[in-house]
Amino acid sequence: MVVWASGLVACSAARGVRLRAGVDYGEDGGKVWVRGPWEAIAPAKNPDEVIDQLCPAVERLERARDGDDGVEYCGLLYSRADGLNYASVPSPLGLPRHQKPGPNKSCRVPATLRDDRESPDVVADFHSHPWPDTPFSRGDLSSRQQRWSFRIQFDTTCRVYKYVPHMGEPRPGEVFLRVGKNWQPQSIVRTDDKRTGVATPPLEVLP
């Protein structure tokens, strides 16, 4: 067993990097917490520079690419008074019914960020899918999942999506795909569809 310089533990090259329960992530009072900042992600003034590092880092984690046998990871993006944006270590904690192998997976969006240096300002959450070519699901886009200004999702091909829900505003939510260094509009979620997360046009698996 090898301890990485980042503080994460690798159980083997084949299985990927294993995060430390109780140190990197955990549960307190039924709510998930995560530690920040994540040493694998370099902070940056532009949040897109942080976002562009997420998928390669998460894909190195244990079972992140294992499809029906895999797990999803959920983390947070935040800023601090130094003007930089950071990412937390992600958590693999999901709903109990999704722990067994199968086509349905989940990770619970962290409710708390533990960064002892100062009070962080959480701006977004991010999560992975353990399969290739999988965009946001309806559940990902539904209003019950929206807590911050936007959310990020990516799959094992590192196709990265952003959802801006415009919570509490009488305007549609917007789904974007990261193309190069730009965000390309993909779909909207009409105000009447925010509860169910139905996108127009539907988000489909891309070739």
Image: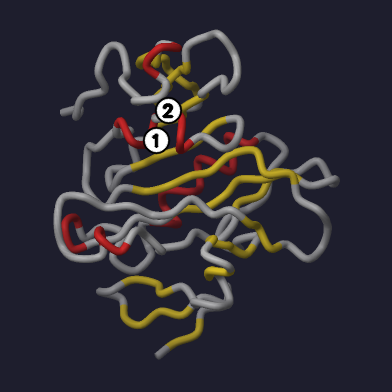
Q: In the figure, is residue 85 to the left or right of 174?
A: right
Badge 2 density bin: few <14, some 14–19, many ≥20, Cα 10 Å: some
In the depicted structure, whether residue 30 falls above or below residue 120 = below
Please, what secondary structure does the residue beneath circle 2 have? strand
Q: Quick one: 94 or 122, which is closer to the camera?
A: 94
Q: In the figure, is residue 7 to the left or right of 18?
A: right
Q: Earlier in the sequence, mark 2 or mark 1?
A: 1
Residue 166, x across and y down, in percent: 56, 20
- Mark on residue 110? none
Could you say which quadrant of the image residue 50 lies in?
top right
Q: Identify the residue at image location x=35%, y=82%.
A: 11
The residue beneath circle 1 is 160
Could you say which quadrant of the image residue 95 lies in?
bottom left
Residue 99, x across and y down, in percent: 26, 65
Residue 72, x across and y down, in percent: 34, 55
- Mark on residue 178? 2
Q: Identify the residue at image location x=57%, y=67%.
A: 29
Q: Identify the residue at image location x=84%, y=46%.
A: 82
**Disc 1 residue type?**
Val
Q: Residue furthest front?
A: 29
